[in-house]
Image (cartoon, rainbow, N blue to C red):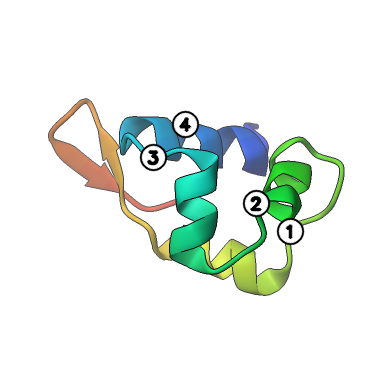
Amino acid sequence: MIDFGSQVRTALKEQGKSLRGAAKELHYDVAYLSRVLNGKQAPSPELTQLFKRIPRPISGCRRQQFP
């Protein structure tokens, strides 16, 4: 199973977004997001829900939701 941080990093990369850009868009502290994505802190339920709603492009043409 792929961990939360890996899923989010992959989605950000596919969308051409940086961690800093995502933090600004989502109104979260970049240091907090970094800790979450590096597995040093558990994501809040609110953050998990935010990322579940972000569609992920797969193979450049299809879109898929986070599991």
Which of pointers 4 and 2 indicates the residue nearer the eye? 2
| Front residue of 10 and 58 | 10
Q: Amino acid at mark 3?
A: Lys
How many angstroms separate mark 1 from mark 4 (CA)? 16 Å
- Please tell me which residue is depicted at 61% across the width and 62% down the height of the picture: 48
The residue beneath circle 3 is 17
Residue at disc 4, secondary structure: helix
Q: Amino acid at mark 1?
A: Pro
**Label at residue 43:** 1
- As drawn, the residue found furthest toward the bottom would be 46
- Please tell me which residue is depicted at 53% across the width and 45% down the height of the picture: 20
Q: Upstream in the sequence, badge 3 or badge 4?
A: 4
Q: Are marks 1 and 2 in contact (CB under 8 Å)?
A: no
The residue beneath circle 2 is 30
Q: Position of residue 29 (x, y in %)?
A: 67, 60
The residue beneath circle 4 is 10
Q: Amino acid at mark 4?
A: Thr
Q: Are marks 3 and 1 in contact (CB under 8 Å)?
A: no
Residue at disc 1, secondary structure: loop
